[in-house]
Image: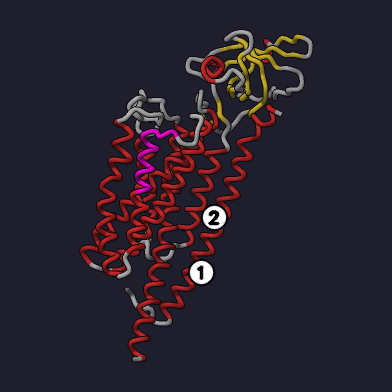
Amino acid sequence: MEAFLVRYSIYVVFLIVLVIWIGIAGWLWRLERRLVKLEQWARQHGGNRP
Amino acid sequence: MKAILISLGVVGGVIVGLVPAVHRSRPRWWMALCIGGMGLTIALGLLPPLSGTFRDAVITWRQVNPELYVPVAGTLDWDAAVASGDTLVVPMTDRAIPPTTAMVVIPPGFSVPKDASVVILAVQRWKNDQQFVVRGIVAADPILALPFIPGLEERARNLFFHVPLSWVAVVAYAYALWYAVLFLRRRRFIDDIHSVSAVSIGTLFALLATATGSIWAKFNWGSFWNWDPRETSIFLLLLIYAAYFALRQSIEEPQRRAQIAAIYAIVAFVTVPFLVFVMPRLMEGLHPGSASDQTAGPILSTQPGVLHPLKQIVFALSMFSFSLLFFWLLSLRVRSGILALQHKIQQVQEMSETR
C-alpha cells in the first residue's frame, strides 16, 4: 500500500487540480462569451459610455 | 539564465495580459493561451517525478524522517547483480555530481525494468550509507524529473502555485494604484471601476496565496499559522485591503465614494512593498529568504544551483499563466462594471426624459 502511495499520490493531486482548472476555465470561457453578447446588445441599444 | 526566464514570465504575463486592453473582450487565441498555459503549469508542476541522490536518502534518514522513502535516480549495473534467495542486490550509480555508487536491495515482488537506462527507485537507507532497500519503482527512463529536496519532498511543488498567486496580488494592487491616480486626475468613473476591480481580484489572489501557504505550512512546519513575519505581513495586507471595501460600503454618494477610495488605494499601496518585499526579509523567520536563511530564497538567490533549470522554466510559465488569469478575471469584472454603469446612466436619462 505504501509503495502504491509513493507511486501514485501525486497523480491523484494532479487529477484533482486539473479537474478544478477545467471547471474554472469552462466557466470563464462561457462568462466571456455571455459578456461579449451582452456588450453587443448594449451597443445596439445605444449604451452610453461612462 | 534564471533571471532572464523569470523576468520573461513576469514581464511577458503583464504585457500579454494588457494586450488587448482590459476593457476589451478577450480574443480566442488569448483565452486559449491562458487555459493552455495554466494546464501546462499544472502538468509540469505536478506530473514529473522527483529524483534525488543517495546523499539525499542519507540526509533524509538522518535529519528528516528515517521512515521516508526517497526517490533516487540512477543506472543499475545488472551485470554485477547478486541474487540472495529471492532478493537481488544490484549496484546503482546515481546522477549526482560527482556520482555515487551504492548497493540497492530489490526484494521479491518488484520487477525493475532491466532495459531502462535510468530508473527512479523509492529507497530507504538500510544497514549503512552504502546500502539501500527498494520500496517502490517510481519511473523508468523519465522524460522530465524535478529535484528531490530533503525536508520538502513533494511539498516543494507548491512553489509553482503559491508564489505566483502572491505576485499577482502585488500586480493587482499596483494596477489599482495606477487607476486610483488616474481617477483623481480625470474624474472618470471608468477609472474607479478599474481600481476597485483590481483590488477585489488582487485580494482574492492574496487570500488564495495565504490558503496555499497555510496548507503547506501545516505539513511542513506543523501548524496552519505560525505568525512568521511573512504570514504576519500578508495578514496585515489583507486587513488593509479589507478596510478598503468597508470604506467603500460606508459612503453612499458615488463621486465621493470613488474619490475617497482612490485616495485610500494610493495610501494602502505605500505599505505593499514594505510588507511584501522588505519586512519579511529583514526579520528572522521560517520563510525562505528571511534574515535567518542562508540564501535570498529559491527565486531571488543568485547562487548557482539553488533552483533547478526545469523548476525555473515551470516557475516562469506559472508566473506568465497566473498573470493572464488575473487579467482575464479583471477584464470580466471591469467590463461587467462598465455595463452596469451604462445601464444606470440610461435609467437616469430615461427618468429625466419622462419628467
Going 31% across and 51% down the picture, which residue do you hit? B174
Query: Where is residue B128 shown, x and y percent of the image?
Result: 60, 8
Q: Secondary structure at mark 1?
A: helix
Residue type, label 1: Arg
Image vertical order of residue B328 relative to residue B278, above or below: below
Can residue B286 be seen here? The reply is yes
**Horizontal side, residue A21 vs residue B200: left or right:** right
Q: Could you tell me residue B83's position as x and y percent?
A: 75, 10
Between discs 1 and 2, the one toward the N terminus: 2
Q: Which residues are magenta?
A: B226-239
Report the label total.
Answer: 2
Q: Which circle marks residue B217 in the picture?
A: none
Residue A44 is inside the magenta segment: no
Looking at this view, name the residue that lies furthest to the front: B250
User: Which element type, helix, strand or loop, lies under badge 2?
Assistant: helix
Question: Which residue does the image show at 75% across and 9% down from the upper left?
Answer: B84
- What is the quadrant of the C terminus of chain B in the image? bottom left
The colour scheme used to paint the residues is secondary structure
Pick the residue in front: A10 or B66.
Answer: B66
Farthest residue to the right: give it.
B85
Visible residue check, residue B195: no
- Residue farthest left in this picture: B185
Q: Is residue B235 magenta?
A: yes
Residue at 44 percent across and 58 percent down: it is: B329
**Chain of the residue on which disc 2 is drawn:** A
Q: Would you call the spot at circle 2 few (<14 residues within 10 Å), some (14-19), or many (20 or more)?
A: few
B90 over B303 or under it: above or below: above
Characterize the local packing of mark 1: few (<14), some (14-19) or many (20 or more) Cα atoms within 10 angstroms.
few
| Residue picked out by circle 1 | A34
Q: Which residue is mark 2?
A: A24
